[in-house]
Amino acid sequence: MNKYIITSIVSLFCVMGAFAQRQVASPFTRFGYGELFEPSMVFAQMGGIGNSVRSTNHMNFMNPAHHSAISKETFLFEFGAGYSGRQIRKGSLSSTSHKVDIEYFAMAFPIIPQRWGMALGLLPFSSVSYDFMNYDNSVGARYDYNGDGGFNQLKWGNAVTLFKNLSLGVNASYVFGNSTYNSMVSFPELTQSLIDKNTGKLYDEETYDRTLKITRYNMTGFYFDFGAQYVWKFRENESLIFGATYQHKSSLKYDETNLLTSFNRSYDVEDDYTDTPQDTITETLRENVSTDLPQRISFGVGYEAKKIKAGIDFGWQQWKNVSVFENDYSYLQNKKFLKIGFEHMNTNATSYFKRLPCRVGFHAAEMPVFYTIDGSDYKPIDFGLTLGTEFFLRQTANSFNVSFDIGRRGEVPFSNTLYEKYCIVKVKVNLKERWFFKQKID
């Protein structure tokens, strides 16, 4: 047991640095805290459901009441990585990005089998990564916007089964990390014709006067979410599972650094540029300022039989009137979401491939923002299809999962508005060991 504890703790701190680089490259990450991570773990293959599913072999931080489902004498260790390919489009313009990153690291084990379960995990909280520009031809100005960074969370979950079929749980999460937002305005100051000394050709040297604002947030703090699950076994091999989660509105602390500076940029014949600093206009620092996390409520109903699992989750997140870094985010709106998942698995099949589970799902959500383009307001949505399976390693209880999430988000219909197409591939490794079990030799 000691070697697993030591290995897990060392691995935990080794991957913390890698998590800080997790990015998704999407203009929608400019809003709020960026793109929020949904900790549905292996159930991401089933549309990301998590309220109304229970498994003795997998972890689920979506509903903390699930932690009590881990079977006795069991230590679960999971980690995941992912690839995301995204194409951003607006009219005839498009941009494509590809990212590979570590996603999460977690472990779970029972304290009192079938009564009290515990889980610990390091997961992303949100990610910020965008880069776009805009022109104002009336004044000859160019505006550049970009941001990067994100926040991570260390989760500690506990769940107890109070009665035969009712489980209650809580996740305590510590959020930490930083994100940087840059905005720059450029005005053409001078264009002059020069002769290239190497080729003798005439070229135009362009000079721009630029003002750059850099805002950096360093956030830390705790928040809690609660969950409940009730299992109704109405037949010998059939059950209905009812689940609910609640995350109350809470506040985190952050430090804010602002830097406003001006400089002059000159381009040469090879399109290389040179920046000449002009002046640092202002620099400010604020410490221990409060920012809000929204209230979230969700419900789910699941069905389990010998070969089938199915579930549906729905809920909302109250982003309206939430203060994010004390900015005027009047464009934040409440988020509603729906998730549907299905699994078929025949453990009695004689063929290895016929025993593999088939998992599919669907998810749809109103994004918690609205934005204005060319004088029109847009309310984007996010929807996608998921599918995946789990490959079991022979003669062990270990496995690895592969899932695909293909979808779009933006304003419907996707005509000349800003929208995004994405394909997300996730690989999750599930290691299962037996603790406190002594083998008997006759």
Image: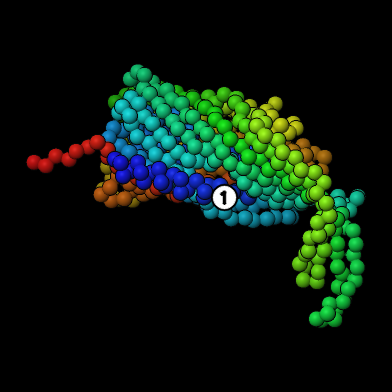
Secondary structure under the numbered disc 1 in the rendered image: loop
Question: What amino acid type should be assigned to the residue bearing mark 1?
Answer: Gln
> Which of the 4 image quarters holds residue 215?
top right
User: Measured from the top left, where is residue 6 in percent x and y?
Assistant: 35, 44
Number of labelled discs? 1
Residue at horizontal 63%, vertical 40%? 218
Q: Is residue 431 left or right of residue 265?
A: left
Residue ID for mark 1: 21
Residue lying at the far top in this picture: please name it.
163
Q: Position of residue 159 (x, y in %)?
A: 40, 26
Comparing 29 with 371, the one in front is: 29
Q: Quadrant of the C terminus?
A: top left
In the displayed image of the protein, which residue is found farthest to the left?
A: 442
On screen, residue 182 versus residue 421, left or right, reads: right
Q: Residue at x 36, y 29 (%)?
A: 117
Q: Is residue 413 visible?
A: no
